Each structure stands twice: as C-alpha cells, then as structure tokens.
Image (cartoon, grey):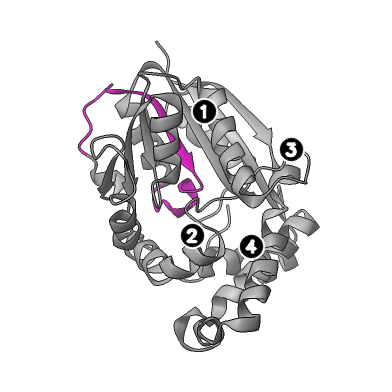
Amino acid sequence: MILPRTDQKHRDVADHYDDLSHWYLQIWGEHVHHGFWETGSESVDLAVVQLTQRVAQETNIRAGTTVVDIGCGYGATSRLLAKGYGARVTGFTLSKAQYEYAITRGEDPANPDIRCQDWFENDLPDASVDVAISIESSEHMEDKPRFFSEVQRVLKPGGRFAICAWIARDAPKSWEVDYLLEPICREGRLPSMGDERDYMRWFEGAGFTDIRFQDFTRNVKHTWPRIIGRMAKRMLWDKEAWRFLFTGPNTVFGLTVLRMAIAYNTGSLRYGLFTATKPE
C-alpha cells in the first residue's frame, strides 16, 4: 500500500474538492470520475456515462433498487441512476460546494437524496440498501477496513457492492513510488493507495463473497490526455485559468495531471472495477 509523506484527512479531501470545484466543472463536467472508452472514439460526455452504466450493469441496478452512492460528487451518477434506471438513490459527499451544486440539479428533490456528510457518520439503518457503489471515493477513505465494514453493515443480505478505484501496480519500483504514486496520493488527498491484493483483503475482511476484479486501465487511460488537452485549450484564452494554475495553492494541480497520465502509460497506476456480494 502506498502512503503519502503527509497525513491526508477527510477535511483535506473536502477542502480539495471545494477549492477546485469550479475548475473541475469547467474542465471535465458533472461526472468527477474517469471516462470508459470502449472504442476510443467516444466523446467525453459519453465515456463518463459509460463508466456508470458498467457499474449499474454489474450490480443489476433497475427500477426500485435502493442504492447508496458513496462519494457522489456533483450527484451526476446518482441522478443518472435515479432517472435512467428508476433506482432510489442516497448520495454522500464531503464537499459543500459539490453538495450545493447537486441539490439544485435533480428533478425530484427526494431522489436522489444528496447529503453533505462523512460516510463514517452516515445514519443509514442496518441492512437497508440493495446496492452500494463507490466510484473513485474509496481512495479518499482514511480507514479503509472500516469503510468496507460500514458498507457491509448497510447492505441487505445478498446486496451488491461495486468499487471503481485507482490502484497501484503490484510491487512498484522505488522511482514509481517516489515520483508518481506517493505524490499522486499527497497531491490528490489520498490517505493511502492500495493495490489489487489490498482491495481483495479488505473485501474478505469485511465478510464479502463472490469478489471479482475487472481491469479497466486500457479503457480509462484516455481520460488524462483529454484533460490535458482541455486545460491547454482553456489557457489559450482564459487568463483566470493561468492565475488559477500558476499562483496560490492550486499550482500543483497541473503537475498532478501530468503525473496521472505518465503513471497510466508506465503501468505504475492501474484502474479497475471490483464487485462483491454480502452473504445471504
């Protein structure tokens, strides 16, 4: 497991997304996660939706399914599942900026139910939801075994759990850790970054069964060249973008984007979908 040189707490995660909220929306849009390219020619808007669709397919989300979306961001995935699939969705985000955006976008104020609340302080009843999803939020959890245990608590027997996550390659070299993976953790506000074996161990430790992993690295790596391209185009005409990226505390953002692109191309960073079931 990769650990950053400085501790990253949940408050740091919230501040990160609050500070960068305007930039994330301008550069990437409402889905604050990777896109999934099946052919490589899809638009960004389609690719980010396709990732959510894969998660919905793997967890059998349909009309009436109760879903908890952990780390729901701007609520785009929650809204898609509610409107497009007929699911009943509760979303959790740490970011006040994301929450304030999300609650103005839904057609039905009760579905999805978006909450600005730490997942570790959720008040969901035991065995109350059919499906739990975590699209690129498990990386931000300080206590990962506790995160898995809390999901196990709220799922009904037979419930499905899906995680999309950035993960480190098995046994990365020291230069990969020093120049790519550790800085990505620190700059991206990740308290830790696991590898495939770590996630398998966390699932098993929380009592999940039927644990499966699908490697989506090839499908999602197109995300970062497109982000770099959008950033470059933005800076051609937007002086505020220059000020944002090259002055103040956000100057590291551009460097982190480059690290992500390099880490995928070198194989230092992987991306996958984990699915598992709570025993009956």
Q: Looking at the picture, how far across and down is residue 84, in whole percent?
A: 46, 29
Residue at disc 4, secondary structure: helix
Amino acid tagged 2: Leu
Left or right of 237, for residue 137 = left
Which residue was labeled with disc 2? Answer: 190
Which residue was labeled with disc 4? Answer: 181
- Residue found at x 66% / y 42%: 36
Residue at disc 2, secondary structure: loop
- Residue found at x 71% / y 47%: 170
Q: Earlier in the sequence, mark 3 or mark 2?
A: 3
Q: Earlier in the sequence, mark 4 or mark 1?
A: 1
Q: Determine the image quadrant of residue 51.
A: top right
Task: Judge whether 177 appears above or below 47 on screen.
Answer: below
Which residue was labeled with disc 1? Answer: 56
User: Bounds of the magenta span?
Assistant: 123-143
Mark 2–mark 1 distance (CA, rounded to whole Å): 25 Å
Task: Decide if residue 195 is in sight here.
Answer: no
Left or right of 188, for residue 12 = left
Q: Looking at the picture, how far across and down is residue 239, in whole percent?
A: 55, 87
Amino acid tagged 4: Leu
Left or right of 33, for residue 74 = left
Quarter of the picture holding the C terminus = top left
Mark 2, other Cα within 10 Å: few <14 / some 14–19 / many ≥20: many
Q: Earlier in the sequence, mark 2 or mark 1?
A: 1
- Residue found at x 38% / y 31%: 82
Which residue was labeled with disc 3? Answer: 38
